[in-house]
Amino acid sequence: MSDTTIPNTKRAQREAEGPYGKIGKSLNELDDRLGIAKGGRTFMDKIFPDHWSFMLGEIALYSFVILLVTGVFLTLYFVPSSATVIYHGAYKPLDGQRVTEAFDSTVNISFAVRGGLLVRQMHHWACDIFVGAIVVHMARVFFTGAFRKPRELNWTIGLTLLILAIANGFLGYSLPDDLVSGTGIRIAYSIMESIPLVGTYLAFFVFGGNFPGTAVIPRFFILHCLIVPLIILGLVGAHLFLLVRQKHTQFRGEGKTEENVVGSPMYPVFMAKTTGFLFIVGGATALLGAFAQINPIWQFGPYDAARISYAVQPDWYMGFLDGALRVFPAWEFTGFGHTWPLEVFIPAVLLPGIIFNLCFAWPLIERKMTGDNEIHHLLDRPRDRPKRTAAGVAMFALLAMLFIASSTDVIANFFHLSLNTVLWAMRILVILSPFVAYPITYKICKELQGFAGGGKRKTPNLVSRTVEGEYLATPTPRYHEDLDHELRPKLVPTFIEEEPDEPAESGVRTVDR
Amino acid sequence: MSDEHRTPVEIGTVSENDPHLQPAAKNPDTVEHVTAFTFVLGLLGVAGFGAAYWVNAKPWILGATMGFGLFFLGVGLVAWGKYLMPRGPFMESRHPLANSEADRDAFAAAIVERGAGVVKRRKMLAGLLGGGLGVFSIVAIFPLLRSLGPLPKGTLFHTDWRKGSYAVDQTGRRVSVGELTVGSIITVYPEGQQNTDRGQAVDQTVLIRISDEDYVTQKGRESWGPKGYLAYSKMCTHLGCPVGLYEQELQVLVCPCHQSMFNVTNGAVPEFGPAPRPLPQLPIYIDADGFIRSQSDYHQPVGPGFWERTTT
């Protein structure tokens, strides 16, 4: 066969185009310009650990994606203005009421815009999921020691993202200017006022004057829709860049060392799983938006500073602050010619400040306490670091008690107790909970350390009797599924699925790149 | 590029029968069928969503079709990746991020020596530039702070209640003496402020009738409770929520936000909860025509505490 043969078969045509066809040619063109072949291959081979707990950060990421998409939809119809209008919309019970344009447009999104109510509810649910997923993801990172060197910076970025998510949640919650959110803004104003020396100035500059003023809705709008999301987006980018640069952590196990990462490659296995997971998070949010009503502002009515409704609760992530404000005693201090509203400043400014700063400083604190300055890529099991685990559980216990304290009135009503009893019970529980949680967790960790192979499924023992009448207990082999994971991990091969029409030439491939 | 210049790179080696390449599922065919089925359901779901949107179906139908559609597509895709693709486990090597001592030294030297050389030689220039940037960074804050809002000045110390202000309800109707029976409560504003933001936020006042006779809550307030009418600021002294609940039996005003309770009989002294101070009482009188009017503004700032609030 000579070189001049005109390719007339599919196979020959493919050979003329090069071994990888049209896609291969395009990739080469791209590589000529951007030099992406080597890095691209490494990126396709990036390994993602298969453990389920690595999925929690993905929930946060994907709920953020949903927030962006639904949020863009909402900005098309929302009017960020405190100007007063008379409502004449589709929701008849509000007809003729004096409302702000912000409230008017939000009710219109809910009743007049096609799909508007669904998108509004999805947006609100996605926010609650976003903050929740960040918290659970951070708990995983904390309890397994994934924040240790070299990942302290990513811990800091993650914590900043949590604070921004909470702040933006509050800003967005405030925008519809309904009775419940308006009360929330009123409280936020008073909390700013409580800061010694600069409080009143701070409140006046944020709100453009005395409460409520007309500046706050447009200002919160631009913060909520542009500035904070932009910062979040940038930090998410940095978070993911560091994750790729530093590679994933992993639990100890067969073939897993400090020098490798074991799991599924980016392309195609992880990509399929994670894209599917994006759809699942989106689907779950849509189902919540369809079946679980959230923030029905037309029932609350427009904001009027002189009105209030009973048993209103903020979004869940604000609960611990509300609880702290309830249980803290009325310790206003007056002296030196000034008022020190400590009953607000301590629970609403100082306490969250201490909690978040403690979280920021934790990698440093732990390094100082343990003297461990080594680089770690293998994760701890929580039981193996009983002090860290106990400290984390103590913090969660405190936050949980503060959260429960945010519904003292509801608890008192439900259990027919006096409000006083519930308040004092919560005060005691808030103070006691970390001191009770710490030793109990510590003890449980220590106990669990005693179980060899703890956490693995146990197989039955085979009991047999010998001819001499002696009983023998022989452990049966490990379960088939458990054994599967004991394959030695391999580098990602070029072709992980051979083409059926081309027989494999050799079992071993060395590819130049 | 010719092949001579390429250096072989370590790459995965597998044979066709390598268990790493086998799907994780024991029965891939069944999984494939189930996955296909979920994809069909997902397709029906998202198509249904399109149809529902087109005909403007109810919100829950939109959500259900989109939700189930996406959910099934997602489940199918996850199943495909998890059970039908090569199960591995695969790995990648992790090389230390830190560079060699020589590289690190070269980097540090470049920064320290180059930078220090430039700055040390021109100390005055560096100082002047630093001073200029420092001053600018401080000055840059001024317009931001000064144009964001007015200074508080005295605005937190006063309300719009004046000597002789008529108490009106939200519709602007003047409240007269015969209007409330004993045990009733109404929210009032100084006339003209009933519909303003400031009126609702700052001037809001609860008018309670606790008796038929003149009522004295505290020493020095002998004339403040004519015919059993008492007027208190409606702003909670804790965080400024409206003190909207009146417990007639206990004679307390309750703030629904954090359950502070104020006893209306003794000058709204807090009896329970986190509120630190009594609700300020508005001195009122009943004029010749029987209308409720204020003797003056409140004697203390209303609402939550703040730094400039003096101790008296």
Image (cartoon, coloured by chain):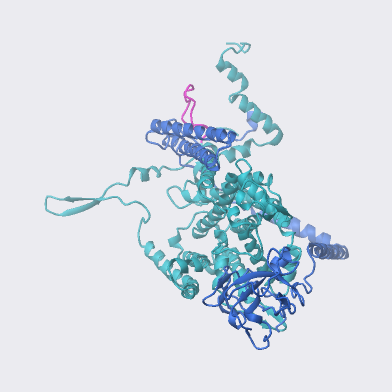
Residues drawn in magenta: A493-509
Q: Residue B86 in the image: x percent, y percent?
A: 46, 36
Q: Main secondary structure of the magenta part?
A: loop
A505 in the magenta segment? yes
Q: Residue A459 in the image: x percent, y percent?
A: 29, 50
- Residue at coordinates 48% horizontally, 33% vertically from top-left? B39
Q: Colour of chain A?
A: cyan
Q: Residue A451 in the image: x percent, y percent?
A: 35, 60
Q: Quadrant of residue B148?
A: bottom right
A138 in the magenta segment? no
Indicate the chain coloured blue by its letter: B
Q: Quadrant of residue B224?
A: bottom right
Q: Is residue A216 above or below residue B266?
A: above
Image quadrant holding the N terminus of chain A, namely top right
Q: Is residue A371 above or below residue B58?
A: below
Q: Is residue A344 above or below residue A467?
A: below
Q: Is residue A367 visible?
A: no
Q: Is residue A452 left or right of residue B121?
A: left
Q: Nearer the viewer, residue A419 or A307?
A: A307
